[in-house]
Image (cartoon, rainbow, N blue to C red):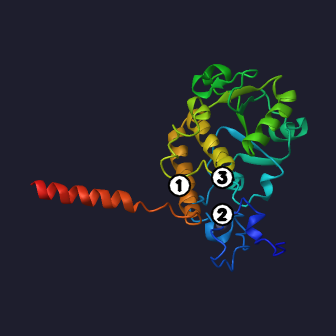
Amino acid sequence: MDTEPKPEYDATVHLPLPTATAPEPHRRSICSNCHRPNPVCLCHVIPVNPIETKTKVLILHHPHETHHKLSTTPILTKTLLHATAVTGRRLRRGDLSSFIGCQSPKPVVMYLFPPSPSSPAVNISDVNLPEITGNGEREVVLIAFDATWKHAREMVKASEEILSDFAIRVSLGVVDENVSGGSIYDSELILRKEPFSGCVSTMEAVTRALSVLEPNGVEIETKLIEILREMVRLQAGFLKPAKPRPKLLKKKKMEMDDSSLNA
Ligand SMILES: [Zn+2]
C-alpha cells in the first residue's frame, strides 16, 4: 500500500502552483496589500486612488472563496471606491441595509446572474437607466456573487428570498450562456479552466456591468481590463505551458520546402 503522503498542492486545487518538482520556497508568502501570493501580487496595477463609480457594488463572497488566494474580490474592493464584500451563502437583509444605509430615494438594486427557465433576467444593456433611476436621482446598487457556478446558483436562489421583492435580476446577455466563447478575455488565456473560472468571472462580470451602468463606463472598463490582463499574465506563468506543436511547425516547413521545390 502506498502510504507516502501526497504532495500538499494536491489538497489545494485552487493554488496555481505548477509542478511537484518546481521549488516554491515563497509559496506561502502573501502580499499584505492585495492579499494575493507574492509572485502574483497585483499592487503595481491597482490604482493608488480607487476608481470612483456612481454604482455601488456589493459582492457576496462564498465562504469557500474567501480562502481562495486568487479570488478577484479583494482586487475589486481595492480598485473600486464603492465596492464592498460580505461573506456568506446568502444575502441577509442586514448586509444590504447596512450597505445601502437609509438613503432617500431608495436605490435601484440589481443583481447579476444569468437567467434560468424559472427566473428570467433583463439583459443589462436593455435596462433603461434614466427611467428606473429617475434620471440619476436614485443610486444603483449592483450585487455580484463570488463563488463557483454551483455555489453561486445556490447563493442566488437563497438570496432571492429577499431580492425578488425589489431587485432586478440582470444578465450580461450572450456572454453568460456562451462561456466558452464570446468573451473578449477568452482570446487572451485559458480563463475558463479551473481553477480560475469562478473567480475571474466575478471581476469580468462586474467590469462588463459597469461598462454599461457608468457614464464613463468605457474608461472604467479599460482600467479594470488592464488589471485583469495583468492578473492573467502573471497567473499564466504558473500554468503548464501550452504544448508545443512541433508537427505543425514541421508541416509548415515541409510546405515551404515543397513550394520552393515547385518554384
Ligand atoms: Zn500586492
* Disc 3 from disc 1: Cα separation: 17 Å
- The amino acid sitting under disc 3 is Glu
Discs 3, 1 touching: Cβ within 8 Å:
no
Residue 120 shown left or right of residue 87 in the figure: left
In this rendering, the answer to whether 243 lies above or below 217 is below
The residue closer to the viewer here, 131 or 248, is 248
Q: Quadrant of the C terminus?
A: bottom left
As shown in the figure, which amino acid type bears the numbered disc 1? Arg
Q: Is mark 2 within 8 Å of ligand 1?
A: no
Residue 154 vs 166, above or below: the answer is below
Q: Earlier in the sequence, mark 3 or mark 1?
A: 3
Distance from the alpha carbon under mark 2 to that under mark 3: 10 Å
Q: Could you tell me residue 90's position as x and y percent?
A: 86, 39
| Mark closer to the observer (2, 1) | 2
Q: Which residue is mark 1?
A: 229
How many neighbours does mark 2 have within 10 angstroms: few (below 14), some (14-19), or many (20 or more)?
many
Q: Nearer the viewer, mark 3 or mark 1?
A: 3
> From what the image shows, is residue 63 above or below residue 96?
below
- For ligand 1, give the image quadrant: bottom right
- Amino acid carrying label 2: it is Pro
Tell me which corner region of the image, top left, top right, bottom left or bottom right, holds residue 144.
top right
* Residue 16 x/y as whole percent: 66, 63
Q: Residue at horizontal 56%, vertical 55%? A: 227
Quadrant containing the N terminus is bottom right
Q: Which residue is mark 2?
A: 16
* Circles 2 and 1: CB atoms closer than 8 Å: no
Residue toward you, 13 or 35: 13
